[in-house]
Amino acid sequence: MPLRFLTPLSLCVLIAGCEAQSSALPTSDKLSEDKVAEIAERVEARYPDLSRTLRDQIIATVVRSLDDMVFIEGGEFEMGDFGTLCNYEPSNMGVWPYGHEPDRLCPITPERHDDHLHQVRLSSYHLSRYQTRLKDFDLYRTSLGLPLFDEEYREREDLADVYHPHNPAPVKLWQEAKDYCLWLGELSNYPVDLPTEAQWEFAARNRGQYIQYPTDDGHLRNGKNMLHDNETSVGPVGQFPPNPLGLYDMTGIATDWVNDWYAEDYYRNSPVENPAGPANGTQKIRRGSYYGELNWMSANTVRRWNHDPVRNNYYSGTSFRCAVQSDEIL
């Protein structure tokens, strides 16, 4: 039979065994059907040699990742360590400055080079409500033809909790976190990237308010809005209530890499408008805290970690979340 008389489905079977036949596209809470179709077209063009199953998983992951983005209306705030009571009860913090003059308060995080308060003005942006899940990071590595990290340990029953698919994705390299976000951006045609340090803190502090802990109510409540201090292992994202902006796990499970290079004196030289960190450096910044720390000391909104961008391993306490660097609502 001449090819011109075959139906599209018959032609698909004849030529490619229907491998290229697209499955039903995922639905989206935010994106139009045309935008979802555009994402699917980009995935099909980028990965013609991947299986139908993997391509469908990538399409669904990109769409879900965009649905998970929380729009953060920009504004101005005083960034840095704004102080706390010198003797305080972390489960009942009250309202800053707790009936005292601000200059009578003690540092929240001594010796972290965050004590220089400075004005910052941010444009609106989007930040993921969840840290990137392990299963999504695995899919990204698979799309690149890379093996799963720690593959030799994944079948061990005693390590099942460590490699739960909904745990925060651990990364060994800061660049892996950066590249994952850029990958989402390439496939969605949105400006997806890591958040800046200022964006992370602004969101953790509920648009820059003087909030010490980025929980649902600004307090630490063991087992209710954060991990118990005696927890010694990572767990899935989204276990506890989000902060008032709808962001989960800004404290307690894993730290977040941000885009900025680190410089000890940057807070004293930071521009007001959309600061993005020094132009270069040798260390990158992580924000938040992780499961192995004492939360009342570490799980606050202002502490910053400076660390080499290459770690020794895929530590489960080091993760990331992506941002859409656009002031237009998705």
Image (cartoon, helix red, strand yellow):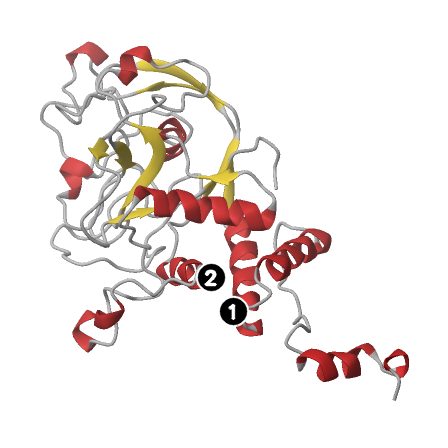
Quarter of the rendering containing residue 22? bottom right
Relative horizontal placement of residue 71, taking residue 180 as reference (left or right): right
Q: Position of residue 132 (x, y in %)?
A: 39, 52
* Residue occupying the point 16% across, 17% down: 105
Which tag, 1 or 2, sits closer to the chain's start? 1
Lateral position of residue 18 relative to residue 97, left or right = right
Up the image or down, 283 lies above or below 279; here it is below
Q: Position of residue 221 (x, y in %)?
A: 22, 46
Q: For residue 37, which quarter of the picture?
A: bottom right
Image height of 275 relative to 298, above or below: above
Picture residue at 52% right of the left edge, 66% below the top: 57
Q: Position of residue 187 (x, y in %)?
A: 57, 51
Q: Which residue is found at the position 16% from the left and 39% from the top? A: 296
Residue in view at x 68 percent, y 53 percent: 38
User: What label does residue 73 carry, if any?
Assistant: none
- Give how far across and how far down residue 101 sits, in percent: 21, 11
| Quarter of the image that includes the C terminus | top right
Q: Residues within 10 Å of mark 2 (few under 14, many from 20)?
A: some
Residue 54's disc is 1
Residue 188 placement, left or right of 236:
right
Residue 90 in view of the camera: no
Image quadrant where residue 294 sits: top left
Mark 2: which amino acid? Ser
Q: Is residue 80 left or right of residue 20?
A: left
Q: Nearer the viewer, residue 42 or 156?
A: 42
* Residue nearer the viewer, 219 or 181: 181
The three-letter amino acid code for the residue at tag 1 is Leu
Q: Do callouts 1 and 2 mark residues in contact (Cβ within 8 Å)?
A: yes
User: Which residue bears the numbered disc 2?
Assistant: 143
